[in-house]
Amino acid sequence: ACSRKNRNAALHPLWQSPLTIPGGTRQSPINIQWRDSVYDPFLKPLKISYDPTTCLHIWNNGYSFLVEFDDSTDRSIIVGGPLENQYRLKQFHFHWGAINDWGSEHTVDSKFYPAELHLVHWNAVEYPSFEEAVMEGNGLAVIGVFLKLGARHEGLQTLVDALPAVKHKDTVIEFDVFDPSCLLPSCPDYWTYAGSLTTPPLTESVTWIIKKKPIEVDEDQLEAFRMLLFTSDGEEEKRMVDNFRPLQPLMDRTVRSSFQ
Ligand SMILES: NS(=O)(=O)c1cccc(F)c1
Ligand SMILES: [Zn+2]
């Protein structure tokens, strides 16, 4: 058995932060073992209403590319599902691999997808800002959508066409009309569990809602993600790939399903 010191010594190459939060009991991502998930008949359908004009810009933050939204009003929200309140859309981003064999953060029966979309929302009913909600157990709700290799996704293409303009870390491009609901599968089925952010500050504030069905994207669209850079203009180029956190222990958690 390794000593306590060693157990916490493992750092993630990307962020030099601990792979597991000392004392963390609800870390993300996790493997979703389909047969161990428990159908909850009291889970409501998730209701999503996004206003495409709340879209602001695309930003390469040196870890992923974020599509950020005006979250000063309740124009783009989700409600229902496992949620007690309505939550406001703040941003969405992706995680992906260098090759198609891996890239997603969550896995289903230990299967990786080539990429995973995260739509990040915060509880503006109970908290005054995203930054405060990030620190609270029911502060955030993130919808996870798996991407699989298949047909070209026309809705995603408008986003892909803008990526060369945010190739380098800390570049931004205006992106003023986009409806992210075009990135959701039509099937309403999801899993849900209590987890955390998967990048620093890794706070245990996320109600995860993981869609059962993936969306399809084609090879060129995945390659467009992989031509982004972790590095700033002028630095030695490092391709933005494998920006996913390793799986975390389930510990004392149950994954519920909205479907039988
Ligand atoms: N990857 S994630 O858990 O969705 C996430 C990480 C950091 C900030 C945030 F708003 C969302
Ligand atoms: Zn994410």
Image (tube, helix red, strand yellow):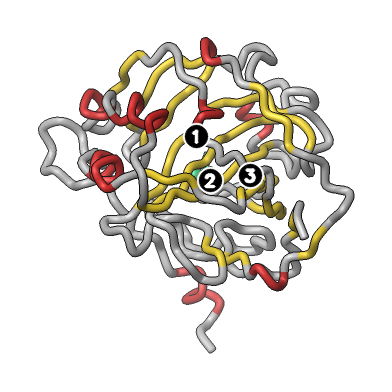
Kindly identify the amino acid type of the residue bearing the numbered disc 1: Leu
Q: Nearer the viewer, residue 73 or 75?
A: 75
Kindly identify the amino acid type of the residue bearing the numbered disc 3: Cys
Asked if labels 3 and 2 touch by Cβ distance under 8 angstroms, the answer is: no
Q: Secondary structure at mark 2?
A: strand
Q: Quadrant of residue 127?
A: top right
Asked if labels 1 and 2 touch by Cβ distance under 8 angstroms, the answer is: yes
| Furthest residue in direction front, as rendered | 151
Residue, x 63% and y 44% (percent of image)? 187
* Sequence-wise first label, 2 or 1: 2
CA distance separating discs 2 and 1: 8 Å
Residue 61, x across and y down, in percent: 35, 33
Q: In which quadrant of the rendered image does the C terminus lie?
A: bottom right
Kindly identify the amino acid type of the residue bearing the numbered disc 2: Val
Q: Secondary structure at mark 1?
A: helix
Residue, x 61% and y 65% (percent of image)? 32
**Residue 205 shows up from this direction:** no
Residue, x 61% and y 48% (percent of image)? 211
| Residue under label 3 | 187
* Sequence-wise first label, 2 or 3: 2
Please indicate whether residue 255 sits to the left or right of residue 171 in the image.
Answer: right
CA distance separating discs 1 and 3: 12 Å
| Residue under label 1 | 183
Mark 2 closeness class: few <14, some 14–19, many ≥20 residues within 10 Å: many
Foreground label between 2 and 3: 3
From the Cβ of disc 3, is ligand 1 less than 8 Å away?
no
Relative vertical location of residue 101 with respect to residue 165 in this rendering, above or below: below
Foreground label between 1 and 3: 3
